[in-house]
Image: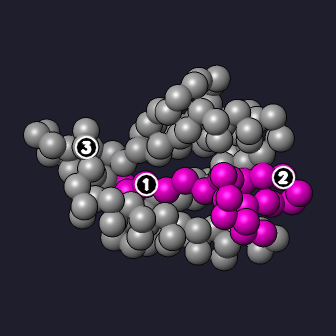
Amino acid sequence: MSSTPESAALANHNGKLAEEIVQALLPGLVYVGADLDAEYMGRPLEIKSCQMVCQASDRGQRPGRFWFRGDQDQALKEEDGYYALVVLDLGNACFFCLAEARELLKDFSGAMTVSWRTIARRVV
């Protein structure tokens, strides 16, 4: 699936919005904005966001997906880090989770997407 300029702009906007939301929810967060977004309680943290629903090209709507990078996941696991996961619906947070990276995903390399509903079942 390729992105359009509109979807890329929306993803950028949602990423910035999710960063603001996480900073408000986790007062001890120190934003660093490098390969990993922040530190929380002395541990690295990566902020991920997605839409509650997305338009699938020919099938109507589908649940939004978080996009994970293997290098970030590996770094978080090596340093006992966290993922802060935010699901947005019309600009409002409708799901938030702080998850330890070593507990969230099995090892992988490259990149992968995971439906937010799948993530929610893993952490709830």
Q: Residue at x 58, y 68 (%)?
A: 19
Closer to us: mark 3 or mark 1? Answer: 3
Scheme of image coloration: one colour
- Tell me where the magenta segment starts and ends, as one range: 30-52
Residue 24 visible in the shown view: yes
Q: Residue at x 74, y 39 (%)?
A: 75
Nearer the N terminus, badge 3 or badge 2?
3
Instruction: Classify the position of the N terminus by image quarter.
Output: top left
Closer to us: mark 3 or mark 2? Answer: 3
Reading the image, the residue beneath label 3 is 2
Q: Secondary structure at mark 3?
A: loop
Which amino acid type is marked by label 1? Cys
Front-most of residues 70 and 91: 70
**What is the residue that sits farthest to the left in this orientation?**
58
Mark 1 to mark 2 CA distance (whole Å): 23 Å
> Does the magenta portion include 40?
yes
Instruction: Classify the position of the C terminus by image quarter.
Output: top right
Q: Position of residue 67 (x, y in %)?
A: 47, 43
Reading the image, the residue beneath label 2 is 43
Reading the image, the residue beneath label 1 is 50
Q: Is residue 4 left or right of residue 69?
A: left
Q: Position of residue 111 (x, y in %)?
A: 50, 33
Residue 98 visible in the shown view: no
Which amino acid type is marked by label 3? Ser
Q: Position of residue 13 (x, y in %)?
A: 41, 70
Nearer the N terminus, badge 1 or badge 2?
2
Disc 1 residue crowd, few under 14, some 14–19, many 20+, Cα 10 Å: many
Mark 3 to mark 1 CA distance (whole Å): 16 Å
Disc 3 residue crowd, few under 14, some 14–19, many 20+, Cα 10 Å: few
Pointers 3 and 2 in contact (C-beta within 8 Å): no
Q: Quadrant of residue 103?
A: top right
Disc 2 residue crowd, few under 14, some 14–19, many 20+, Cα 10 Å: few
